[in-house]
Image: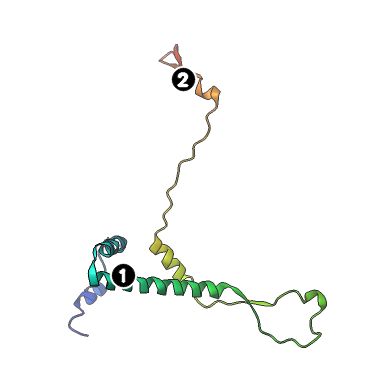
Amino acid sequence: MPQGDYIELHQKRNGYRLDHFERKRKREARQVHELSHKAQKSIGFKGKQFAKKRYAEKALMKKTINMHEESNKRRKTDDDVADGALPPYLLDRETTTRAKILSNTIKQKRKEKAGKWEVPLPKVRPVAEDEMFKVVRTGKRKSEYFRHL
C-alpha cells in the first residue's frame, strides 16, 4: 500500500464523522453559488477561459440529455416486407420499436443540479357568514357574550 493513503486507510478502519455526508451535501450546494460568483467577478482572459469551460460543460450536458430523449423515442423499423404481406387494413399502421440506450441517472442528476424544491402552501378554506358573525360566549358561567367579527 502506498504511503500517502493514510487518510483512506483511517476512513476504512474507523468510518466517517456522523455529520460527514450532511456536510458534504451542504458543501456541494454552496459550490454552485461560489461558481456563480466566480463567473460574475472574473474579468479579462481568465474570465473568457472560465466562460468557455462552463459553456463546454453545459453543451456536453445538453448533448447527453438529448441522447437520452432520443433513446426513449419510438422509431420506425426498416423491415422490408414482401408485396402483399400486409392486409390493407394494417397498411396505415407503422411498426415501431422502443429503444432503451441510457439510464435515468443523467436526468436525475440534472434535476438534482437544478435543485427544484417545492414549498408546501397551506390550504385556505372559505368561512361561512354564520361562522364569521356568530355569538361567542365567554366567562365561567358563559353569561358574557359578544359578536365575533
| Residue that sits furthest to the top in the current view | 143
- Residue 27 placement, left or right of 117: left
- Mark 1 to mark 2: distance in Å? 62 Å
Residue 78: x and y in percent read 66, 84
Numbered tag placed on residue 62 in the rendering: none
Q: Which residue is mark 2?
A: 148
Residue 128: x and y in percent read 55, 27
Viewer can see residue 123: yes
Residue neighbourhood size for the residue with mark 1, other residues' Cα within 10 Å, grouped as few (<14), some (14–19), many (≥20): some
Secondary structure, mark 2, is loop
Picture residue at 81% right of the left edge, 74% below the top: 89
| Residue 14, image quadrant | bottom left
Verify CB contact (< 8 Å) between mark 1 and mark 2: no
Front residue of this view, candidates 68 and 10: 68
| Residue that sits furthest to the left in the current view | 3
Residue neighbourhood size for the residue with mark 2, other residues' Cα within 10 Å, grouped as few (<14), some (14–19), many (≥20): few
Relative to 78, does residue 143 appear above or below in the rendering?
above
